[in-house]
Image: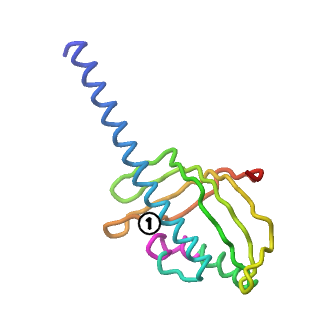
Amino acid sequence: MTARRAWVLACVAALAMGCQARKDRQLAEEIVRRYNRAVIEAHLTGGTGELEKAAGEREAERVQIFVGTIRGRNELLLESLEQLEVKDAAFDAKAGRAVAEERWTYERVDAKTRQPLSPRSHRRYVMRYQLSRRGDGWVVDKVDFVSRSEEVAR
């Protein structure tokens, strides 16, 4: 094999790996966005239908306990995902992982009157997601905080 041919093959391999990495990040972003929408819906409505589609059993249970605790105090957590960027992702046939930077806005309100119970807060998180295949799709099995910080009002 000539040096030129080896160089061309190395470039093609690097390009293919870059394309796969971009596809993995895009797929992970779709999965994480669907999960986050389901969490927001669970907080707003108390319903878990979408959460059960987007999360594995243990993760869905974890979110349901958190939502139940807040709703049990007659509060709602109004949350908005302001920004999501998947920094790293990888998949095999059965499992995946992703690391994402997220910016959220939160506000606790009275469940009946919708009056604010706390000032609106802005938070930045780096999250680690463990993903698994379920049927033809993917679900979030576990979420871990890598880092979190409170942001100043914008």
Residue 15 placement: quadrant: top left
The vertical placement of 98 against 3, above or below, is below
User: Residue at 80% of width from left, 65% of height from top?
Assistant: 119
The vertical placement of 7 against 65, above or below, is above
| Relative image position of residue 9 (x, y in whole percent) | 25, 25
Q: Which residues are magenta?
A: 51-61
| Relative image position of residue 48 (x, y in whole percent) | 52, 80
Q: Mark 1 — residue?
A: 139
| Relative image position of residue 27 (x, y in whole percent) | 40, 54
Q: Left of 121 or right of it: where is 66?
A: left
Residue 78 placement: quadrant: bottom right
In reply to whether residue 56 is colored magenta, the answer given is yes
User: Residue at 39% of width from left, 42% of height from top?
Assistant: 21
What secondary structure is marked by label 1? Answer: strand
Chief secondary structure of the magenta span? helix
In reply to whether residue 77 is colored magenta, the answer given is no
Amino acid on which the number 1 mark rests in the picture: Val
**Crowdedness of circle 1 by 10 Å Cα count: few (<14), some, many (20+)?**
many
User: Residue at 64% of width from left, 58% of height from top?
Assistant: 104
| Relative image position of residue 57 (x, y in whole percent) | 50, 75
Residue 76 placement: quadrant: bottom right
